[in-house]
Amino acid sequence: MRIQSTQSSPTVLISRQRIEERVAELAQEINRDYADTELLVCIGVLKGSVFFMVDLLKQVEVPVAVDFFQTSSYVGTSARGEVRIRKDLDLFIRDRDVLLVEDIVDTGYTLRTILDLLRFRGAKSVKLCALLDKIEAREVDVPIDYSGFQIGNVFVVGYGLDFDERYRNLPFIGALADDTAPGPESGNRQS
Ligand code: IMP
Ligand code: MG
């Protein structure tokens, strides 16, 4: 796909086909584990998780309800790890089985905050499904129940993931050239 940009095009890290195969496998695992569940509340973190969540849930055969959080976090020295909820859930989750669906776990602060909040609200069970696990970048522990791919500490775009709101619609996961990728991180980050 050609990108209308002065920036260089991302190189393919995980192809469309590999994503499709892995998403199908994850859906199978979820179908097996939740076979007896009456209603699974699937919660995505906007906006990055949307492409993954849609493809995944089309293959989930358990009855689902769908909802979203939107968060932002400040990555810098003073407020490191402080995550704000910019859009809360519409649904109540007390006594519900909840599956959190996320595009990528990086430092882990976003997911740690959301997982704690879901448990505090009395969910019956909470599991995490993440397409990408940037394990070397982890600063707080976040157990991933369904993990798509482990990747190195590189900035990736595509299949929902953005750099400055661009590239989300690429059908593959790509890496940006070093001179295009965001530098030492500082500032406000949205999912
Ligand atoms: P956290 O550091 O685990 O809290 O990740 C917060 C959010 O940063 C993720 O949900 C993503 O939206 C975003 N993010 C982290 N790493 C990347 C990346 O390599 N590319 C694009 N977005 C990223
Ligand atoms: Mg995200």
Image (cartoon, helix red, strand yellow):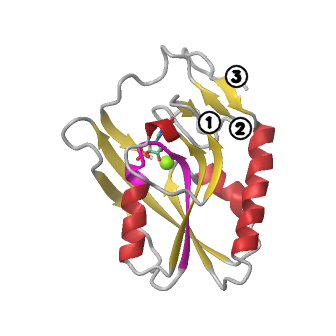
Near-viewer residue (81 or 72): 81
Near-viewer residue (50 or 107): 107
- Decide whether residue 145 is among the magenta residues: no
Secondary element under disc 1, as helix, strand or loop, is loop
- Decide whether residue 100 is among the magenta residues: yes
* Position of residue 164 measured from the top left corner of the image (x, y, whole percent): 45, 32
Q: In screen coordinates, is 3 left or right of 22?
A: left
Mark on residue 158?
1
Against 113, is 82 above or below? above
Quadrant placement of the N terminus: top right
- First to last magenta residue range: 97-110
Identity of the residue drawn at 52% across and 36% down: 162
Mark 3 vs mark 2, CA separation in Å: 12 Å
Majority secondary structure of the magenta segment? Answer: strand
* Position of residue 166 measured from the top left corner of the image (x, y, whole percent): 53, 32
Q: Residues within 10 Å of mark 2 (few under 14, many from 20)?
A: many
Residue assigned mark 3: 2
Secondary element under disc 2, as helix, strand or loop, is loop
Residue at the left extreme?
78
- Mark 1 residue type: Gly
| Ligand 1 is within 8 Å of the C-beta of the residue at disc 1 | no
Tag 1 and tag 3, C-beta contact below 8 Å: no
Q: In screen coordinates, is 147 left or right of 25?
A: left
Secondary element under disc 3, as helix, strand or loop, is loop
Tag 2 and tag 1, C-beta contact below 8 Å: yes
User: Is residue 126 shown to the viewer in this render?
Assistant: yes
Q: Earlier in the sequence, mark 2 or mark 1?
A: 1
Q: Residues within 10 Å of mark 3 (few under 14, many from 20)?
A: few
Q: Earlier in the sequence, mark 3 or mark 2?
A: 3
- Mark 2 residue type: Pro
Circle 3 or circle 2, nearest the eye? 2
- Mark 3 residue type: Arg
